């Protein structure tokens, strides 16, 4: 049986990347859902259409009346644009944080094992 060594730094980086991605998708998904719900409710009310709260989770846009289709599409489009703005802000903060990191030397020479037999 062959033993495979895993670099703890690499697995830690992979874990935190995965965790960050999961949290990011969850937060941005919640923001998207909240903005879509608010926009649809607001626009339906403004159009004089009663807005029933708590959707079923399934939406067949083709089955909706034309006016409601436009409201739903606009709500998703606007909310998606808002998500991209939030993501751009987070990216700018990340770039600024990376620029402020102090460069340090981790190692001055590679770990090389001398395998030549003694003479």
Image (cartoon, helix red, strand yellow):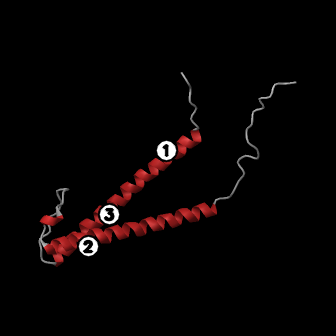
User: Could you classify mark 3 by the number of other residues whose Cα lies within 10 Å: few (under 14), some (14-19), or many (20 or more)?
Assistant: many
Q: Position of residue 32 (x, y in %)?
A: 32, 63
At numbered mark 1, what does the secondary structure look like: helix, strand or loop? helix
> From the viewer's perspective, is residue 94 above or below residue 73?
above
**Residue at position x 36%, y 54% from top?**
26
Disc sitting over residue 32 in the figure? 3
Work out whether residue 106 or residue 66 is closer to the camera in this orientation and state it: 66
> From the viewer's perspective, is residue 1 above or below residue 44?
above
| CA–CA distance in space, label 1 to label 3 | 26 Å
**Residue at position x 59%, y 38% from top?**
7
| CA–CA distance in space, label 3 to label 2 | 13 Å
At numbered mark 2, what does the secondary structure look like: helix, strand or loop? helix
User: Could you classify mark 1 by the number of other residues whose Cα lies within 10 Å: few (under 14), some (14-19), or many (20 or more)?
Assistant: few
**Residue at position x 49%, y 44% from top?**
15
Q: Position of residue 9 (x, y in %)?
A: 58, 42
Asked where in the image residue 76 lies, by quadrant, the reply is: bottom left
Mark 1 or mark 3, earlier in chain: 1
Q: Position of residue 114 (x, y in %)?
A: 78, 32
User: In the rendered image, which residue does mark 2 sit on?
Assistant: 74
| CA–CA distance in space, label 2 to label 1 | 37 Å
Quarter of the image containing the C terminus? top right
Q: Are marks 2 and 1 in contact (CB under 8 Å)?
A: no
Pair 2/1: label in front = 2
At numbered mark 3, what does the secondary structure look like: helix, strand or loop? helix
User: In the rendered image, which residue does mark 1 sit on?
Assistant: 15
Q: Is residue 73 left or right of residue 84?
A: left
Q: Is residue 115 left or right of residue 2?
A: right
């Amino acid at each position: 049986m062959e033993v495979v060594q895993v670099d703890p730094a690499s697995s830690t980086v992979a874990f935190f990347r995965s965790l960050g991605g999961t949290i990011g998708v969850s937060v941005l998904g919640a923001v998207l859902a909240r903005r879509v719900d608010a926009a649809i409710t607001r626009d339906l009310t403004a159009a004089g259409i009663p807005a029933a709260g708590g959707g079923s989770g399934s939406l067949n846009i083709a089955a909706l009346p034309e006016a409601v289709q436009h409201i739903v599409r606009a709500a998703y489009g606007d909310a998606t644009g808002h998500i991209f703005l939030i993501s751009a802000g987070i990216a700018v903060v990340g770039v600024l944080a990376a620029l402020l990191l102090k460069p340090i030397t981790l190692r001055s020479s590679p770990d090389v094992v001398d395998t030549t037999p003694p003479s």
